[in-house]
Image (cartoon, rainbow, N blue to C red):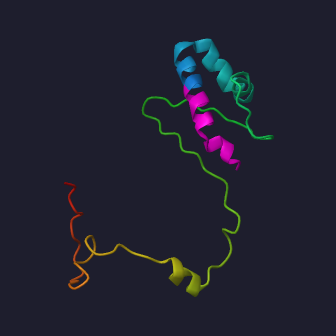
Amino acid sequence: MDNQIYSDAFWEVYAEILVECWSDEEFKERFKREPETVFKEWEFDLPEGLKVSVMEQGEGVLPISLPPKPQGFDQEIAEEDLDAVAGGLIGGVFGGSDDEDDGQPRPPPTCK
């Protein structure tokens, strides 16, 4: 997906559109019907061919977007590749210092 969607310019225009939606019921209904047109009118060009779907979040409703499956998702991952990216938490959270590791969880360090 084009990084333009995650740009500061997008979020600024989106915030302005939200405020207008909260202030004007007719505008909100139009934005729900024609989001691409509204973005264009607010001088933000969405990537060519991008379809925008507006869902209104209601009280007690958590809308969750299901993203498309990433390319290569179905490919097998070799053991050596897994070993290369496998990690863990280092000293201070799961285990003691480098000199002492009894395997017991430790509380996170406090900020001073």
84 falls in the magenta region: no
**Residue ranking furthest to the right:** 49
Image height check: is 22 above or below 90? above
Residue 56: x, y in percent? 56, 29
Counting from the top left corner in percent of width and height, residue 21 is at 57, 19
The quarter of the picture where the C terminus appears is bottom left
- Identified at 59% across, 23% down, the residue is 17
Q: Nearer the viewer, residue 4 or 87?
A: 4
Find the residue positioned furthest to the front.
112
Image coordinates for residue 31, horizontal then vertical, percent? 66, 23
Q: Viewer-proximal residue, 40 or 58?
A: 40
Q: Residue at x 24, y 63 (%)?
A: 108
Q: Magenta part of the protein: which range?
A: 1-15
Q: Decide which of 54, 37 is in the foreground and name it.
A: 37
Q: Position of residue 38 (x, y in %)?
A: 70, 23
Q: Main secondary structure of the magenta part?
A: helix
Query: Is 13 contained in the magenta span?
Result: yes
How many numbered circles are shown?
0
Query: Is the residue 59 above or below the residue 29 in the image?
Result: below
Does 93 sit left or right of 31 as displayed?
left
Residue at the (74%, 26%) spot, across then down: 40
> Residue sitting at 23 percent across and 83 percent down?
101
On the image, which quarter does residue 97 sit in? bottom left
Instruction: Establish if 63 lies above or below 18.
Output: below
